[in-house]
Amino acid sequence: MMVLSLTVATLTASPAHARGTPDGFADLAERLQPAVVNISTTTIMSDRGPEMPQFPPGSPFDEFFKEFFDKRGNGNGNNQNAIPRRATSLGSGFIIDPEGYIVTNNHVIQDAEEITVILYDDTVLKAEVVGRDAKVDVALLKVDTKRKLPSVSFGDSDQARVGDWVMAIGNPFGLGGTVTAGIISAKTRDINAGPYDSFIQTDASINRGNSGGPLFNMDGEVIGINTAIFSPSGGSVGIGFATPANLAKQVLTDLRKYGKTRRGWLGVRIQTVSDEIAESLGLKRTYGALVSSIQDGSPAATAGVQVGDVVLEFNGREIKDMRRLPAIVAETEIGSKVSMEVWRNGERKTLKVTVGGLAEEDEQDSEAPAKAAPTAEVGDTAIAALGINVAPLSDASRERFDIPADAKGLVVTEVNAKSQAAEKGLRQGDVIVEANQTALSTAADLTAQAAKAKETGRKSLLLLVQNSSGMRFVALPLTE
């Protein structure tokens, strides 16, 4: 099974009022088809063929193979006689402005030397790229025309519900003007396509060539851009994915105005709120994004966000899971002042944050294995309830485990291989900075916090752990 770059279309019914099964889609299709276009791209490729084998200088085979490959135009891999060839691909798009602005997927026009747009009436126009965004897989094109073109508008994809009818129009396998219909099967799907995955899933039939086409709701509004399908064979099996309109709209506005994307930025590193973390923090249900670290001088720092806060809402939108926060922040207008609801010390708190602009993506380093300890650390103490041994930080432990000079807390010197701590990923050399959001300096501090958690009926102890990958929270179950 694999995910292929294709397009998906979906019809959504308005949540404002219930709708039954439509009598048909003919009127809707007739109205919308003129705004959907076919896109053909051409890429010039050098037909290099196989490279000439490398032989030692003076080898008798060197001259023989050189003559053979020179005749094919590949004697040294860059022969001037190499024959270029033209590779073409097909996709879909839709007009969002009568002046000739067209939306499609970035992967449809990526590396294209020439882009041709074919309108519904078979008019052929050359298109130029206004801007593109690989992370959301969206591109904005422009064609020059003296006449006003038919166009469609975006709807509110957040209002679309699972089970709503949707309709897709596109160019599958080069068969332009193809209409299919289905329902929204799921929302906020993460298919590991990028950092802002939040796809609409649909069972409307889509195939190769549908990429970049629109997914309409029953009001004729675009609620998604068909992007990919899940298929073991390359054909439709009823699982397609569309980029939500609300995620694409701000990106397209930026591409048209600036030629590039300007994403909102908060300046925090976050992690998933597990059932155990939610229980340890007193949350009645498992949702939100847990703040594990804050960048100095960031909008979050200025707004008073603290490590250990759980972001529950941002700009009036609930953070149902950790993945939603980056997408919601990214599509928020830079410079806008919005409300943010956080869970702190057992209660909700409202903060005001001015959204910044993201200069570059935050890249997380892979976790490096801790260095083995040749001898026991001075002050080493076993915490039986947690399945670990800890010790105060010292110059020797900092050097041995490559711990930064500004790190504070207790170093993990040993982890029971059969313990929950091992299952949760605690490793020798990790630094436990806090327990129950209380700073630690001695093993007695950690023991006291474990006892306090048990006394209050908690089943786990929330630890803030630092290692080479940064800060993260770990909810560690307490043994009897």
Image (cartoon, rainbow, N blue to C red):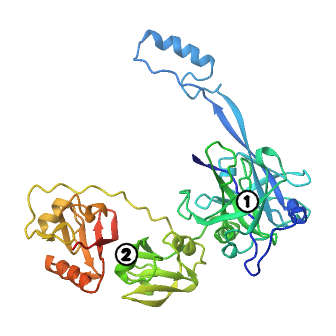
Which residue occupies the foreground of this view, 293 or 6?
6
Judged left or right of residue 60, residue 470 is left
> At which x and y percent is residue 414?
17, 62
Where is residue 146, by image quadrant? bottom right
Q: In the rendered view of the protein, which quadrant contains the C terminus?
A: bottom left
> At which x and y percent is residue 209?
74, 48
Which residue occupies the foreground of this view, 105 or 435?
435
Per the image, label 1 sits on a secondary structure element best described as: loop
Judged left or right of residue 410, residue 250 is right
Where is residue 301, by image quadrant? bottom left
Residue at the extreme top of the image, as rendered: 60
Per the image, label 2 sits on a secondary structure element best described as: helix
> At which x and y percent is residue 63?
50, 12
Judged left or right of residue 292, residue 457 is left
User: Which residue carries the number 2 mark?
Assistant: 277
User: Which residue carries the number 1 mark?
Assistant: 9
Residue at left 68%, top 53%? 238
Specify the amino acid type for callout 1: Ala
Residue 296 showing in the rendered view: no
Foreground tag (2 vs 1) = 2
Badge 2 or badge 1: first in the primary sequence:
1
Within 10 angstroms of label 1, few (less than 14), some, or many (20 or more) residues?
Answer: many
